[in-house]
Every structure is written in C-alpha cells, then in structure tokens.
C-alpha cells in the first residue's frame, strides 16, 4: 500500500474510533431515535390527510400518524449526524493541526472525515427506516433509506463546517438544533398544510423531504430531488474543509533585518543570537 493510502486508512480508523467513543451520540442513536419516533406515533391522531408534494406531481393522501413519524425520524437523524460531526470536528481541530504541522498529509485527513460521515450516515439512515418499517409499511424501503441518508449528509456537512468555524460547543449545538427544527417544521404537512410556498425549495432538506414523502406514500419514487441535497452537502462540506485547511496552514517566521542566522539555527527556523565569549587574561 502506498504512503497516502496508509495515511488515509489510519486517519479513517481513528475517525471511526473517535465516533465510536462518543457515548452521548450512541445513546441518542439507540435510545432517543426510537423514543422520538414512538412519541410521534403516540401523540398524533390516526387520520388520512391530503397534502401537496410537488415531487409526486400533485397531492398525496397518507396517514397523518405515519407522516409525523417520518418527519420525526428525519429530525432525529439530522440532529444526531450534525451533532456527531460537529463534536468530532470541534474536538479534533488542535490535534489535526499538530498532525499537519508534523507532516501528516492534510488531504488524507480531510478525506477521512468525509468518508467517516458517509459510513455513519448510511448506518443511521438504515436504522431509522428500519424503525419506521416496524410501525407502518414503507412503500419504497431503499428509496426512503437514500432520502434519509441524503438528509444526514446535509447536516453532517453543516456539522463539519460549524466544528471548524466556531470556538464553543454551545453555539454549534444551538445552531444545529434550531436549523433542524426550522427546516423540518415548515415542511411538516401536519403543521403547515400549505407546503407549496415558493421559498421552501431553497431549504437544505427540501429535496430529501420530497423524496422521503414519495418513497413512503407515493406509487413512484422521486430520487432526482436529492440533487439539491447533494449541492448543499458539497457546499457545506467544502466550506468546512476550506476552514480546516486554512486553520492548519503553517506560517513561516520572518527573519529580523540585519540579524545573522547560523546553519544549525536556520535548520530549526530560529534566528541566531550572537554570544560574547570572555576575553583571555593571559
């Protein structure tokens, strides 16, 4: 294996181990997600509702309880993945910077973060859809997994961006929670029956929500709507990695004018200071 391949494998391994040691994220995934979906099922009445889904070509008729469970699953997945990627990036900034300054390939570190996000998002999306499938029959199982996976990628990229940019944990968690609530709240048909407003297509989760509604309740899928989520993922991830790249740059020290440098000091990037020797009294 080449040196770059070994560096990527090592970085990916440590990234996954770091995610695995995030006990709060594991508790949220194993406990909070099924609990939240169950609460949506418990608190929403069983009734057929009609709502507009442009991806299906018109209106859809679905059980309001099932719609609430789907929106709740999306909310849990986006918050979980966004929170996980934010904490992972936030806590590893200083270590990554030291690794880069010590000579570790920066590209492999960045690629490992993105691949780790993809693996975790795929696992969590599959788990969330399996929980939904336990409560009601999903019409297009794999299409729904793909839609939830796309939503997880969007907020995972946002987590990388916030983790690279912000200085405190509380700010990132607040932004992540509020962004997910607002994004999904205005697209929830049980809360906003007028789901065809002109500004909704500009929201990060518009494409995944349209694809998930069609996958869960429509005869045909609409995976083409996931292209908008891919664009959001590229924008947020690229911005986050750009901030990471900038913060791990090495700035050479400038030499003061007129000050000589010895060969040994120059090797270490240190300016030489002339030392006076004592005069001989002989």
Image: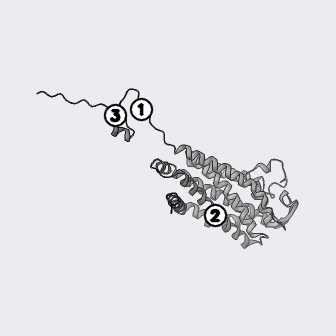
State which mark lies toward you, 1 or 2. 1
Q: Quadrant of residue 57?
A: bottom right
What residue sits right under mark 1 in the picture? 255
What residue sits right under mark 2 in the picture? 32
What residue sits right under mark 3 in the picture? 272
Furthest toward the right, the residue is: 58
Residue visible at 77% across and 52% down in the picture: 186
Where residue 208 appears, x then y in whole percent? 75, 58
Position of 134 compared to 91: left or right? Answer: right
Residue visible at 63% across and 66% down in the picture: 123
Q: CA distance from mark 3 to mark 2?
A: 60 Å
- Residue 107 to residue 10: above or below: above
Furthest toward the left, the residue is: 282
Q: Secondary structure at mark 1?
A: loop
Residue visible at 34% across and 38% down in the picture: 263
Residue visible at 60% across and 59% down in the picture: 115
- Label 3 vs 2, first from the N-terminus: 2
Alpha-carbon neighbours of circle 1 within 10 Å: few (<14), some, or many (≥20)? some
Where residue 66 appears, x then y in whole percent? 78, 66
Between 67 and 243, the one nearer to me in the picture? 243
Q: Secondary structure at mark 3?
A: loop
- Residue 212 seen by the camera: yes
Q: CA distance from mark 1 to mark 2?
A: 56 Å
């Amino acid at each position: 294996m080449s040196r770059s391949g070994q560096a990527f494998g090592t970085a990916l391994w440590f990234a996954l181990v770091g995610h695995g040691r995030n006990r709060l994220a594991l508790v949220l995934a194993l406990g909070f997600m099924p609990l939240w979906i169950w609460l949506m099922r418990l608190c929403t009445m069983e009734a057929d509702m009609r709502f507009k889904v442009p991806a299906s070509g018109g209106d859809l008729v679905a059980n309001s309880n099932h719609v609430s469970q789907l929106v709740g699953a999306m909310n849990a997945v986006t918050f979980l993945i966004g929170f996980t990627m934010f904490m992972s990036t936030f806590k590893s900034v200083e270590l990554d910077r030291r690794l880069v300054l010590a000579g570790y390939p920066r590209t492999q570190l960045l690629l490992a973060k993105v691949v780790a996000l993809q693996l975790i998002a795929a696992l969590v999306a599959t788990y969330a859809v399996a929980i939904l499938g336990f409560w009601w029959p999903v019409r297009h199982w794999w299409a729904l997994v793909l839609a939830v996976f796309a939503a997880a990628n969007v907020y995972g990229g946002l987590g990388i961006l916030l983790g690279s940019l912000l200085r405190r944990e509380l700010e990132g968690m607040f932004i992540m929670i509020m962004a997910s609530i607002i994004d999904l709240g205005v697209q929830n048909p049980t809360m906003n029956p007028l789901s065809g407003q002109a500004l909704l297509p500009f929201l990060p989760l518009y494409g995944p929500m349209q694809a998930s509604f069609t996958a869960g309740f429509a005869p045909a899928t609409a995976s083409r709507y996931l292209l908008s989520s891919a664009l959001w993922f590229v924008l947020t991830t690229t911005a986050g990695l750009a901030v990471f790249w900038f913060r791990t740059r090495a700035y050479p020290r400038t030499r003061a004018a007129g000050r000589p440098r010895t060969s040994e000091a120059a090797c270490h990037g240190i300016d030489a200071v002339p030392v006076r020797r004592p005069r001989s009294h002989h």
